[in-house]
Image (tube, rainbow, N blue to C red):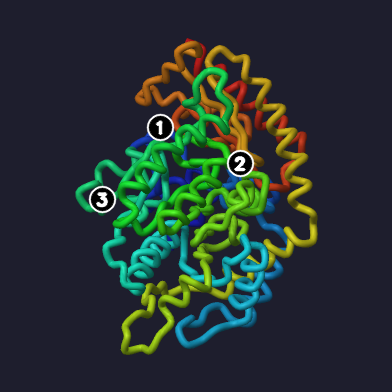
Amino acid sequence: MPAMATGNASYSARDLAHVWHPCTQMKDHEVLPMIPIRRGAGVWLEDFEGRRYLDAISSWWVNLFGHANPRINAAVRGQLERLEQVILAGFTHEPVIALSEALTAIAPAGLTRCFYADNGSSAVEVAVKMSFHYWRNVGKSAKRRFITLSNSYHGETLGALAVGNVELYKDIYKPLLMDVITVPSPDCFEREPGESWAEHSRRKFAHMEAALAQHAGETAAVILEPLVQCAGSMRMYDPVYLALLRQACDRHGVHLIADEIAVGFDRTGTMFACEQAGIRPDMMCLSKGLTAGYLPLSAVVTTDSIYSAFYDEYVKLTAFLHSHSFTGNPLACAAARASLDIFRTDDVLDRNRALAAHLGAKARELEAHPHVAEVRQHGMIVAIELVRDKATREPYPWQERRGLTIYRHALSRGVLLRPIGTVVYFMPPYVITPEEIDLIVQVAREGIELATCD
């Protein structure tokens, strides 16, 4: 057996001998120390040498109610003593039943059926296949293409990559991907001077309307991230776009898939971002915050109408045969139920409104910085866009990696920030305090000064 590791360096060495990390150029770790974490509590993470880091990004946008939350811990621990896993084909269990009841109770009216998978990318794969298969089952097999937005991100399995458009992730794999129809994003960072978010979003919808008018006969669904394109540099748009899209999809007979994986569960100021437009998608993809960041789980919540198109005699071969070994895992479902119970009992949405107001006000203090082009916000997501030239909005060359300077400074000050290029963002757990918000914004301010001082 290897000797027991006693500090960060020992764990880092063991890690680098075997672990290939996601979204990472591993050569960076020749100079960028790996940080092994031994415990978490609330918004704080602690390494093996006792240093603490405030998790301002919810550990990749998943953590809602803090690390090692006692109520969620107790729910998972209790479930572990009863049932850890069972096949969900031909069998069921109380946690998945109760979670499905709870999800359909809070989802937009009419979303009544839950299909489970393991992660966000898999949920997108399910929704894409489900839409395609639905149209085949109802005799419209020509409807097999998908419309997506520029700068969108829906995951990194091949189907999810195909319907996304962040070139950093997609470009190398294009020979493997299905062809999609891409229309310009309603990204309000690109609005004209004096133009409101709603005006810009409404104007950009003309591109979507034209695409639907031209391609409706061959289009299965439109897929988009409601309100915030998170991996696409936290670019944001107005809810009016969603309202217009719902109307257009209905007119043209096309499904609307809402990827709420990153923006669901009150990240944008409502339980689901679609609520701000008063719409119901045909399929809603959920993951990340679904289990409050505890365990991998995703769901596609859809309608009875779509469900019914697959419901027939076995010999008709209309069944939806997509499957995952851990579909509806009882431990993950128990964590998700506990998270939804916290929403139900603790008035989370009202508390988050107050926290979001404080976070936005503090972040907007940076608007006067000579290299800050915009501070934008939807609920508990705030982003600060850095540019070389504020007047022209000329970006910094990506090769300069100025966000890395901010990341390293923040760690030295005990804060976990992970800028997307030169976009600094905050997406903290909901148990953060106003004083902790002040800290993360101050550390971001310091990092921005360091990264833009030349």
Lower sequence index among marks 2 and 1: 1
The disc label shown at residue 269, or none: none
Rendered position, 230 above or below 399: below
Q: Which residue is mark 3?
A: 179
Q: Nearer the viewer, mark 3 or mark 2?
A: 3
Disc on the earlier residue, 1 or 3: 1
Residue that numbered label 1 is attached to: 31
Left or right side of 30 for 333 = right
Q: Is residue 66 visible?
A: yes
Please indicate whether residue 196 sits to the left or right of residue 356 in the image: left
Give the answer, above or below, for where 338 lies relative to 277: below
In front: 193, or 21? 193
> Which residue does the image show at 39% across and 67% down from the upper left?
130
Q: Is residue 14 visible?
A: no
Q: Amino acid at mark 3?
A: Asp
Distance from label 2 to label 1 (Cα)? 27 Å
How many numbered circles are shown? 3
Which quadrant would the N terminus be assigned to in this image? Answer: bottom left
The residue located at (65%, 41%) in the rendering is 380
Structural crowding at the residue carrying mark 3, measured as other residues with C-alpha within 10 Å and reported as few (<14), some (14–19) or many (≥20):
few
> What whole-number distance in Å separates the C-alpha atoms at marks 1 and 3?
40 Å
Near mark 2 (Cα within 10 A), the count class, few <14, some 14-19 or many ≥20, is many
CA distance separating discs 3 and 2: 33 Å
Which tag is nearer the camera, tag 1 or tag 3?
3
Secondary structure under the numbered disc 3 in the rendered image: loop
- Report the amino acid beneath label 1: Val
Labels 3 and 2 touching (C-beta < 8 A) = no
Q: What residue sits 48% from the left and 33% below the top?
A: 187
Secondary structure of the residue carrying numbered label 1: loop
Which residue is label 2 attached to?
427
Q: Position of residue 91 (x, y in %)?
A: 51, 86
